[in-house]
Amino acid sequence: MNKLNFIIVALLMHFFIAGSAFSQFARVQVIHNSADRAAAEVDIWLNDILLLDNFKFRQATPFVDAPAGVPITISIQGPNSKDTVGALAKFTYTLEAGKKYIIIANGIVIPTGYNPVKPFNLYVYDMGREGASNANNVDVLAFHGSTDAPTVDVVESLVGAGTIIDNFEYGKYAGYLELPNENFKLDIKDETGSTTVISYSAPLKDLNLKGQSLVLMASGFLNPSNNNNGAGFGLFAVLNDGTVAALPVSTLSNVIENSFINKLFTNYPNPFSDETVISFNVEKAGRVAVNIYDYRGMLVKTLIDEILSYGEHKIKFSSNNLPSGIYTYKIIKDYNVLSGTMSVVK
Protein backbone atom coordinates (compact mmCIF):
# COMPACT_ATOMS: atom_id res chain seq x y z
CA MET A 1 0.00 0.00 0.00
CA ASN A 2 1.56 3.32 -1.07
CA LYS A 3 1.30 6.71 0.57
CA LEU A 4 -1.66 7.74 -1.58
CA ASN A 5 -3.61 4.70 -0.42
CA PHE A 6 -2.72 5.51 3.18
CA ILE A 7 -4.14 9.00 2.72
CA ILE A 8 -7.30 7.57 1.18
CA VAL A 9 -7.65 5.22 4.16
CA ALA A 10 -7.23 8.14 6.54
CA LEU A 11 -9.92 10.12 4.73
CA LEU A 12 -12.30 7.16 4.75
CA MET A 13 -11.74 6.77 8.47
CA HIS A 14 -12.41 10.46 8.97
CA PHE A 15 -15.73 10.37 7.13
CA PHE A 16 -16.73 7.13 8.83
CA ILE A 17 -16.08 8.54 12.27
CA ALA A 18 -17.52 11.97 11.52
CA GLY A 19 -20.77 10.35 10.45
CA SER A 20 -21.02 8.14 13.49
CA ALA A 21 -21.99 8.70 17.09
CA PHE A 22 -18.41 9.26 18.22
CA SER A 23 -17.66 12.78 19.41
CA GLN A 24 -14.18 12.36 20.87
CA PHE A 25 -11.06 11.48 18.97
CA ALA A 26 -7.44 10.52 19.45
CA ARG A 27 -4.69 10.51 16.83
CA VAL A 28 -3.08 7.17 15.97
CA GLN A 29 -0.14 6.01 13.85
CA VAL A 30 0.25 2.26 13.21
CA ILE A 31 3.62 0.69 12.30
CA HIS A 32 4.20 -2.90 11.13
CA ASN A 33 7.51 -4.13 12.57
CA SER A 34 6.85 -7.86 13.02
CA ALA A 35 9.62 -9.67 11.13
CA ASP A 36 7.81 -13.03 11.37
CA ARG A 37 7.30 -14.38 7.84
CA ALA A 38 3.78 -15.40 8.87
CA ALA A 39 3.02 -11.69 9.31
CA ALA A 40 4.77 -10.43 6.17
CA GLU A 41 1.41 -8.96 5.12
CA VAL A 42 -1.54 -8.49 7.45
CA ASP A 43 -4.94 -6.83 7.52
CA ILE A 44 -5.67 -4.51 10.42
CA TRP A 45 -9.26 -4.01 11.52
CA LEU A 46 -10.70 -1.30 13.75
CA ASN A 47 -13.81 -2.88 15.25
CA ASP A 48 -15.57 -4.23 12.14
CA ILE A 49 -13.98 -1.75 9.70
CA LEU A 50 -10.99 -2.83 7.59
CA LEU A 51 -8.44 -0.14 8.38
CA LEU A 52 -5.41 -1.45 6.47
CA ASP A 53 -5.51 -4.05 3.71
CA ASN A 54 -2.40 -6.17 2.99
CA PHE A 55 -0.26 -4.06 5.33
CA LYS A 56 3.37 -5.03 4.73
CA PHE A 57 6.30 -5.46 7.10
CA ARG A 58 8.09 -2.12 7.56
CA GLN A 59 5.15 -0.04 6.43
CA ALA A 60 3.38 2.61 8.48
CA THR A 61 0.27 4.76 8.35
CA PRO A 62 0.22 8.50 8.79
CA PHE A 63 -1.49 9.76 11.94
CA VAL A 64 -5.26 9.29 11.60
CA ASP A 65 -8.30 9.98 13.78
CA ALA A 66 -9.66 7.16 15.92
CA PRO A 67 -12.62 7.14 18.33
CA ALA A 68 -11.78 7.96 21.94
CA GLY A 69 -13.58 7.43 25.21
CA VAL A 70 -15.09 4.09 24.16
CA PRO A 71 -13.56 0.61 23.86
CA ILE A 72 -12.21 -0.20 20.39
CA THR A 73 -10.92 -3.55 19.19
CA ILE A 74 -7.89 -3.78 16.90
CA SER A 75 -7.70 -7.13 15.13
CA ILE A 76 -4.67 -8.47 13.25
CA GLN A 77 -5.77 -10.79 10.47
CA GLY A 78 -4.11 -12.53 7.53
CA PRO A 79 -4.05 -10.74 4.15
CA ASN A 80 -7.20 -10.43 2.02
CA SER A 81 -9.41 -11.14 5.03
CA LYS A 82 -13.18 -10.65 4.89
CA ASP A 83 -13.80 -10.34 8.62
CA THR A 84 -12.06 -10.74 11.98
CA VAL A 85 -13.11 -14.35 12.62
CA GLY A 86 -10.05 -16.40 13.61
CA ALA A 87 -7.82 -13.32 13.80
CA LEU A 88 -4.12 -13.79 14.55
CA ALA A 89 -4.50 -11.43 17.49
CA LYS A 90 -7.04 -9.05 19.00
CA PHE A 91 -6.46 -6.14 21.36
CA THR A 92 -9.00 -3.89 23.06
CA TYR A 93 -8.17 -0.33 24.08
CA THR A 94 -9.94 2.79 25.25
CA LEU A 95 -8.11 5.76 23.79
CA GLU A 96 -8.03 9.09 25.59
CA ALA A 97 -9.41 12.08 23.71
CA GLY A 98 -6.79 14.49 22.43
CA LYS A 99 -3.86 12.12 22.89
CA LYS A 100 -1.53 10.96 20.14
CA TYR A 101 -0.77 7.23 20.03
CA ILE A 102 1.96 5.29 18.27
CA ILE A 103 1.14 1.58 17.95
CA ILE A 104 3.87 -0.79 16.75
CA ALA A 105 3.02 -4.38 15.81
CA ASN A 106 6.03 -6.46 16.81
CA GLY A 107 7.14 -9.95 17.74
CA ILE A 108 6.65 -13.54 16.58
CA VAL A 109 3.25 -14.93 15.57
CA ILE A 110 4.22 -18.57 14.88
CA PRO A 111 7.22 -19.65 17.01
CA THR A 112 8.56 -22.52 14.86
CA GLY A 113 12.01 -21.67 13.51
CA TYR A 114 12.59 -18.56 15.63
CA ASN A 115 15.12 -18.18 18.44
CA PRO A 116 14.47 -16.47 20.74
CA VAL A 117 10.68 -16.25 20.56
CA LYS A 118 9.27 -12.90 21.66
CA PRO A 119 5.48 -13.24 21.31
CA PHE A 120 3.57 -10.94 18.99
CA ASN A 121 2.12 -7.86 20.66
CA LEU A 122 1.07 -4.30 20.01
CA TYR A 123 3.40 -1.83 21.71
CA VAL A 124 1.52 1.35 22.51
CA TYR A 125 3.06 4.75 23.22
CA ASP A 126 0.49 7.32 24.34
CA MET A 127 2.61 10.48 24.23
CA GLY A 128 3.23 10.66 20.49
CA ARG A 129 4.06 13.86 18.63
CA GLU A 130 3.24 15.16 15.16
CA GLY A 131 6.04 17.68 15.15
CA ALA A 132 9.04 18.79 17.17
CA SER A 133 8.38 20.57 20.45
CA ASN A 134 10.92 23.16 19.29
CA ALA A 135 10.68 24.22 15.64
CA ASN A 136 14.49 24.17 15.33
CA ASN A 137 14.85 20.57 16.52
CA VAL A 138 13.99 17.05 15.39
CA ASP A 139 12.22 14.94 18.03
CA VAL A 140 13.16 11.25 17.82
CA LEU A 141 11.29 8.45 19.61
CA ALA A 142 13.38 5.25 19.70
CA PHE A 143 11.86 1.76 19.87
CA HIS A 144 13.74 -1.55 20.30
CA GLY A 145 11.92 -4.03 18.08
CA SER A 146 14.59 -6.61 17.19
CA THR A 147 13.55 -9.87 18.85
CA ASP A 148 17.04 -11.42 18.91
CA ALA A 149 19.02 -8.27 19.72
CA PRO A 150 20.29 -7.89 23.30
CA THR A 151 20.01 -4.91 25.60
CA VAL A 152 22.13 -2.17 24.03
CA ASP A 153 23.44 1.34 24.50
CA VAL A 154 23.13 3.95 21.76
CA VAL A 155 26.09 6.32 21.59
CA GLU A 156 26.34 9.38 19.33
CA SER A 157 29.93 9.76 18.10
CA LEU A 158 29.94 12.36 15.30
CA VAL A 159 29.12 15.52 17.27
CA GLY A 160 30.24 14.04 20.59
CA ALA A 161 26.87 13.77 22.36
CA GLY A 162 27.92 10.48 23.96
CA THR A 163 25.44 7.94 25.35
CA ILE A 164 21.95 9.06 24.38
CA ILE A 165 20.11 5.81 25.28
CA ASP A 166 21.35 3.57 28.10
CA ASN A 167 20.39 -0.10 28.65
CA PHE A 168 17.82 -0.16 25.84
CA GLU A 169 15.73 -3.35 26.11
CA TYR A 170 13.53 -5.18 23.61
CA GLY A 171 9.95 -3.92 23.46
CA LYS A 172 10.77 -0.59 25.10
CA TYR A 173 10.35 3.00 23.98
CA ALA A 174 13.16 5.31 25.04
CA GLY A 175 11.10 8.50 25.08
CA TYR A 176 11.63 11.43 22.76
CA LEU A 177 15.13 12.75 22.18
CA GLU A 178 14.93 16.45 21.28
CA LEU A 179 17.88 16.71 18.90
CA PRO A 180 19.31 19.69 17.02
CA ASN A 181 18.84 19.61 13.25
CA GLU A 182 22.25 18.07 12.52
CA ASN A 183 23.71 14.89 11.05
CA PHE A 184 24.61 12.21 13.59
CA LYS A 185 26.41 8.89 13.83
CA LEU A 186 24.77 6.31 16.09
CA ASP A 187 26.96 3.56 17.50
CA ILE A 188 25.03 0.52 18.74
CA LYS A 189 27.05 -0.90 21.65
CA ASP A 190 26.61 -3.81 24.03
CA GLU A 191 25.07 -2.91 27.37
CA THR A 192 28.52 -2.44 28.93
CA GLY A 193 29.13 0.33 26.41
CA SER A 194 32.55 -1.11 25.55
CA THR A 195 31.95 -2.94 22.24
CA THR A 196 30.43 -1.38 19.11
CA VAL A 197 28.18 -3.86 17.30
CA ILE A 198 27.32 -1.64 14.31
CA SER A 199 27.07 2.07 13.49
CA TYR A 200 24.48 4.02 11.50
CA SER A 201 24.33 7.45 9.93
CA ALA A 202 21.35 9.58 10.97
CA PRO A 203 21.43 12.47 8.46
CA LEU A 204 18.62 14.55 9.96
CA LYS A 205 19.92 17.79 8.46
CA ASP A 206 20.50 16.34 4.99
CA LEU A 207 16.94 15.00 4.97
CA ASN A 208 15.45 18.39 5.90
CA LEU A 209 13.69 17.09 9.01
CA LYS A 210 13.87 20.33 10.97
CA GLY A 211 10.71 20.86 13.01
CA GLN A 212 9.53 17.27 12.55
CA SER A 213 9.20 14.26 14.83
CA LEU A 214 9.82 10.63 13.94
CA VAL A 215 10.07 7.10 15.29
CA LEU A 216 13.46 5.38 15.08
CA MET A 217 12.99 1.64 15.39
CA ALA A 218 15.35 -1.32 15.55
CA SER A 219 13.96 -3.92 13.15
CA GLY A 220 14.73 -7.41 11.87
CA PHE A 221 17.12 -10.08 13.11
CA LEU A 222 20.78 -9.90 14.10
CA ASN A 223 21.01 -13.58 13.18
CA PRO A 224 18.54 -14.32 10.36
CA SER A 225 19.75 -17.94 10.07
CA ASN A 226 18.27 -18.63 13.53
CA ASN A 227 15.03 -16.96 12.53
CA ASN A 228 13.73 -18.61 9.35
CA ASN A 229 16.17 -16.52 7.30
CA GLY A 230 14.05 -13.47 8.00
CA ALA A 231 14.90 -9.84 7.38
CA GLY A 232 18.28 -8.64 8.63
CA PHE A 233 18.77 -6.09 11.39
CA GLY A 234 18.49 -2.38 10.63
CA LEU A 235 17.48 0.98 12.02
CA PHE A 236 14.45 2.54 10.34
CA ALA A 237 13.05 6.06 10.57
CA VAL A 238 9.26 6.37 10.45
CA LEU A 239 7.96 9.84 9.62
CA ASN A 240 4.56 11.23 10.59
CA ASP A 241 3.25 10.87 7.03
CA GLY A 242 3.96 7.12 7.06
CA THR A 243 7.24 7.23 5.15
CA VAL A 244 9.66 4.51 6.32
CA ALA A 245 13.37 4.80 5.52
CA ALA A 246 16.36 2.62 6.38
CA LEU A 247 19.27 4.45 7.98
CA PRO A 248 22.52 3.74 6.12
CA VAL A 249 25.22 1.76 7.87
CA SER A 250 28.06 4.10 8.75
CA THR A 251 31.48 2.80 7.72
CA LEU A 252 33.20 6.16 7.60
CA SER A 253 36.01 5.18 9.99
CA ASN A 254 36.82 2.07 7.96
CA VAL A 255 36.79 4.08 4.76
CA ILE A 256 39.28 6.58 6.13
CA GLU A 257 41.59 3.85 7.41
CA ASN A 258 41.54 1.97 4.10
CA SER A 259 41.74 5.21 2.07
CA PHE A 260 39.98 3.67 -0.93
CA ILE A 261 37.58 6.58 -1.27
CA ASN A 262 37.52 9.93 0.42
CA LYS A 263 35.69 13.22 0.09
CA LEU A 264 32.28 11.69 -0.27
CA PHE A 265 29.93 14.59 -0.89
CA THR A 266 26.24 14.56 -0.18
CA ASN A 267 24.53 14.09 -3.51
CA TYR A 268 23.43 17.40 -5.01
CA PRO A 269 20.72 18.48 -5.25
CA ASN A 270 19.13 16.77 -2.27
CA PRO A 271 16.13 16.51 -2.10
CA PHE A 272 15.55 16.27 -5.86
CA SER A 273 12.72 15.49 -8.24
CA ASP A 274 14.39 14.39 -11.49
CA GLU A 275 18.16 14.03 -11.29
CA THR A 276 20.98 14.25 -8.77
CA VAL A 277 24.75 13.79 -8.91
CA ILE A 278 26.80 11.65 -6.51
CA SER A 279 30.41 12.87 -6.26
CA PHE A 280 33.38 11.09 -4.69
CA ASN A 281 37.15 10.71 -4.99
CA VAL A 282 38.86 7.37 -5.63
CA GLU A 283 42.28 7.21 -3.96
CA LYS A 284 43.39 4.05 -5.73
CA ALA A 285 42.17 2.73 -9.09
CA GLY A 286 39.95 -0.35 -8.95
CA ARG A 287 36.46 -1.73 -9.46
CA VAL A 288 33.74 0.43 -7.89
CA ALA A 289 30.00 -0.24 -7.73
CA VAL A 290 27.38 2.38 -6.93
CA ASN A 291 23.99 0.91 -5.97
CA ILE A 292 20.66 2.51 -5.09
CA TYR A 293 18.34 0.92 -2.49
CA ASP A 294 14.79 1.69 -1.42
CA TYR A 295 13.52 2.17 2.14
CA ARG A 296 13.30 -1.60 2.70
CA GLY A 297 16.89 -2.18 1.61
CA MET A 298 15.86 -3.65 -1.76
CA LEU A 299 18.18 -2.95 -4.70
CA VAL A 300 16.58 -0.42 -7.06
CA LYS A 301 19.39 0.14 -9.55
CA THR A 302 23.12 -0.36 -10.09
CA LEU A 303 24.47 2.91 -11.50
CA ILE A 304 27.96 1.61 -12.23
CA ASP A 305 30.04 -1.53 -11.64
CA GLU A 306 33.35 -0.95 -13.37
CA ILE A 307 37.02 -0.06 -13.02
CA LEU A 308 37.49 3.58 -12.03
CA SER A 309 40.71 5.53 -12.20
CA TYR A 310 42.27 7.62 -9.45
CA GLY A 311 40.58 10.99 -8.93
CA GLU A 312 37.17 12.60 -8.70
CA HIS A 313 34.10 10.96 -10.21
CA LYS A 314 30.54 12.23 -10.68
CA ILE A 315 27.70 9.74 -11.18
CA LYS A 316 24.28 10.93 -12.34
CA PHE A 317 21.14 9.29 -11.02
CA SER A 318 17.73 9.88 -12.59
CA SER A 319 14.66 9.15 -10.48
CA ASN A 320 12.64 8.26 -13.61
CA ASN A 321 9.47 6.52 -12.44
CA LEU A 322 10.53 6.09 -8.81
CA PRO A 323 7.96 7.27 -6.26
CA SER A 324 8.73 9.95 -3.72
CA GLY A 325 10.64 8.64 -0.73
CA ILE A 326 14.00 8.21 0.92
CA TYR A 327 16.66 6.12 -0.82
CA THR A 328 20.14 4.94 0.12
CA TYR A 329 23.15 4.86 -2.19
CA LYS A 330 26.17 2.68 -1.48
CA ILE A 331 29.64 3.04 -2.98
CA ILE A 332 31.39 -0.33 -2.83
CA LYS A 333 35.06 -1.12 -3.44
CA ASP A 334 37.12 -4.09 -2.25
CA TYR A 335 34.43 -5.17 0.25
CA ASN A 336 34.33 -1.69 1.78
CA VAL A 337 31.13 0.32 1.71
CA LEU A 338 30.32 4.00 2.08
CA SER A 339 26.64 4.98 2.31
CA GLY A 340 24.60 8.11 1.85
CA THR A 341 20.93 9.03 1.88
CA MET A 342 18.86 11.02 -0.60
CA SER A 343 15.26 12.11 -0.86
CA VAL A 344 13.10 12.00 -4.00
CA VAL A 345 10.29 14.58 -3.92
CA LYS A 346 7.68 14.75 -6.70
Image (spheres, rainbow, N blue to C red):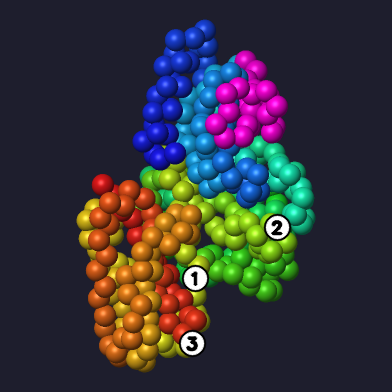
Say above or below: 246 vs 19: below
Residue reaching furthest left? 274
Helix, strand or loop for disc 1: loop
Q: Which numbered dot is residue 250?
A: 1
Residue 175 appears in the picture as rendered: no
Q: Residues within 10 Å of mark 3 (few under 14, many from 20)?
A: few
Is 36 on the left or on the right of 211, as rendered? right
Q: Please report whichever mark, 3 or 1, sits nearer to the chain's N-terminal start.
A: 1
**Rendered residue at 42%/57% (across/down):** 294
264 drawn magenta: no
**Rendered residue at 26%/80% (across/down):** 313
Looking at the picture, which amino acid does disc 2 mark?
Asn
**Rendered residue at 44%/50% (across/down):** 138
Residue 60 x, y percent position in the rendering? 50, 41
Q: CA distance from mark 3 to mark 2?
A: 34 Å
Of residues 83 and 134, the one drawn nearer to the viewer in this rendering: 83
Residue at the spot of label 3: 257
Is 332 on the left or on the right of 162, as rendered? left
Q: Locate residue 114: give its quadrant.
A: bottom right
Looking at the picture, which amino acid does disc 1 mark?
Ser
95 drawn magenta: yes
**Residue stretch in magenta:** 70-96
Q: Please report whichever mark, 3 or 2, sits nearer to the chain's N-terminal start.
A: 2
Q: CA distance from mark 1 to mark 2?
A: 25 Å
**Rendered residue at 50%/44% (across/down):** 59
Q: Nearer the viewer, mark 3 or mark 2?
A: 2
Helix, strand or loop for disc 3: helix
Q: Residues within 10 Å of mark 2 (few under 14, many from 20)?
A: many
Residue at the spot of label 2: 227
Say above or below: 37 vs 125: below
